[in-house]
Image: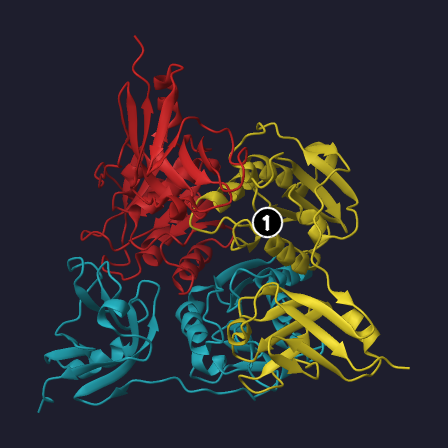
Chain colours: A yellow, B red, C cyan
Amino acid sequence: MAIITFMSDFGMSDHYVSAVKAKILSINPGLTIIDISHDIEVFNIAHAAYVCKAVFRDFPKGTVHLISVNSHGEKKNRYLAAKIEDHFFIIPDIGILSLICEDEPGMIAELFTTAGKHTSFPAKNILAKAAAMLASGSGMNDVGDFTKDYLRKTDRKFRATKRQISGNVIRVDHYGNLITNIEEEVFNILLKDRPFLVQFGREKADKINCSYNELDDGDCFVIFNNLGVLEIGINKGNASKLLGLKYDSPVSIVFDDPVN
Amino acid sequence: MAIITFMSDFGMSDHYVSAVKAKILSINPGLTIIDISHDIEVFNIAHAAYVCKAVFRDFPKGTVHLISVNSHGEKKNRYLAAKIEDHFFIIPDIGILSLICEDEPGMIAELFTTAGKHTSFPAKNILAKAAAMLASGSGMNDVGDFTKDYLRKTDRKFRATKRQISGNVIRVDHYGNLITNIEEEVFNILLKDRPFLVQFGREKADKINCSYNELDDGDCFVIFNNLGVLEIGINKGNASKLLGLKYDSPVSIVFDDPVN
Amino acid sequence: MAIITFMSDFGMSDHYVSAVKAKILSINPGLTIIDISHDIEVFNIAHAAYVCKAVFRDFPKGTVHLISVNSHGEKKNRYLAAKIEDHFFIIPDIGILSLICEDEPGMIAELFTTAGKHTSFPAKNILAKAAAMLASGSGMNDVGDFTKDYLRKTDRKFRATKRQISGNVIRVDHYGNLITNIEEEVFNILLKDRPFLVQFGREKADKINCSYNELDDGDCFVIFNNLGVLEIGINKGNASKLLGLKYDSPVSIVFDDPVN
């Protein structure tokens, strides 16, 4: 049986998280449910998409990812099952899908809503059931009608020229580290052995570090992290607070005059 | 084997939650433990009872619900097992039982306390053992002595006349939504197709919405929620902060002059 | 199969916790993972060691304890497996081992780091794999090379004379209770039926209570707790805030003039 992962903006002080789990286990008591996070910032689709994108491929293929963030977010109240790279996603149709995956999903189904369109708790009454069914071996056509229609949102992208990569902070993590949308792959293509400067706030760095801790405590590090994107932090410190940078702050890499 | 659910006011920064789980798994490694919440406000019995009541029926019958909130709350240090609607509850005798269920529980047993009455960690030394035994198939007489005696507390109730229903906020949830004790069933009986006004703080509403999101962002909604009680919120906003209402704030529904 | 426990300073708002679990379950989907805490204060080794020491023996022998706190904390980037009292620990070599266990561990292995020494996510790329292998039946020699070398740190200890025990607060728990390093066993040896005074901040107590709740709400209690150490609290109150005491504050027990 497949694993179900569960992410929400429900927090942990109400019954919402456990009601969804109860529903899943009532349908199939043998299912394994792994919490991704219930501390997603309330209504924050970008936060949910970032965390989901960062981790879903670490789970075995066939895993069902249930995401309930801002579940009441769009007036039309559509709920989707989607298949991306052999993972299943059960989500409200509020744009997360397009932020997780730039390509078109392999298959999308609009979930049946036998519970009535106007349930005040769709995560329990619609999403949990579909997730439990898929994880128990049902097909996507058992949980909804195939469709091509889903809400597309556009992620903020870095811009790159021969001379410069301009990006943004896309996440301030639990440590205060600043994770950007500047990709290692693009940096490597543009570098051509030239000197460069990473610019963020009032700071500059002229090299990329290999690890968090080759520097002394309190020093600033700039690395390409495990996700393959530029991350700025302060060893044993909170970079966001100490550098005054936050979500959406600009970060750029400027290369020396173009070669040739 | 039955599921054990676990709710406490322990928080997650100490060893308390995992010590209880370790005890349960030491008795029976095959048991499934589902966290309800460990963010119950410290010593807050009303919060615990609200969350428990909102979710316990979603679990399969036979589920064992371990609740350790304010475990040292009463001087007599009694701990109970109780059976309500084919669910088992393992709790300190501090009044939660009467707040979860208005009817008399089907069976109550006072737990054996072989660990000594004065343990400083009853959730681990008394409650965990009883929960693991019940979930593994033991009977209530294996974990304690049957009794009729338990602490009764009275929940704050709404008052209803032909002209008005007067209630209170019983929970401000993670989103800042205001959940009241005004029941949809009572409203429907009293309504008789009359116009009405829902009054809360300085605001008034003259209709009940069907869902959170039929309104625009920032608008106030008034719905009967999944639990069948009146809930007031602000679409994409924090109603508690924006309306200045909190736990226990009065909410009323006033009907037009009585018919006939 | 053995249980894996998991403790970190990752918080729950990023993908870090679930990425480690995904790795473990990809290696062996049948493993049971129990969260100890992911609310360990960032970089705080003493907090991690306190919680680990307080709970690890409650789990069945053979349990694998994965600890990722301050994982990038030391420049040499070593990661260890250790066997203590038939429990396994998978940890970065930053001194936690010596704080959990005063005796030399039975066996220590330095983990293989095939993922490259400079991974920015060692909990996922190094620790998770070793934990999954040990919990699935591999030997310590399958996950690393045996070694005697590990970082030793010294815990703050109480000092005891015939006349006085001087200790410190080693943890302020979720309730604000003050947990000290003064051991019940030492107190009992030195007591010799003499009167004594427990001194903390501006307060004094001349007896040890048997339980949290033999006093009235708001009264101060002094007990030897479930861990066998002196704990000071206020019934239904936050002792740390109300008494102005915190981590490292001095606490002492002064006995009457020595006998004979």
The residue lying toward the viewer, choosing from C104 and A165, is A165
The residue positioned 29% from the left and 14% from the top of the image is: B258
Q: Is residue C221 left or right of residue C93?
A: left
The residue positioned 60% from the left and 70% from the top of the image is: A178
Percent across and percent down for residue C57 are 43, 68
Residue that carries the numbered disc 1 in the rendered image? A32
- Residue B245 is drawn in which quadrant? top left
* Extreme-bottom residue of the structure: C260
* Extreme-right residue of the structure: A260
Q: Is residue B158 left or right of residue C198?
A: right
Q: Is residue C20 left or right of residue C186?
A: right
Percent across and percent down for residue C55 are 42, 67
Q: Amino acid at mark 1?
A: Thr
C49 up-or-down from B154: above or below:
below
Label 1: how many residues lie within 10 Å, few (<14), some (14-19) or many (20+)?
many
Percent across and percent down for residue C189 are 21, 82
The residue positioned 35% from the left and 63% from the top of the image is: C174
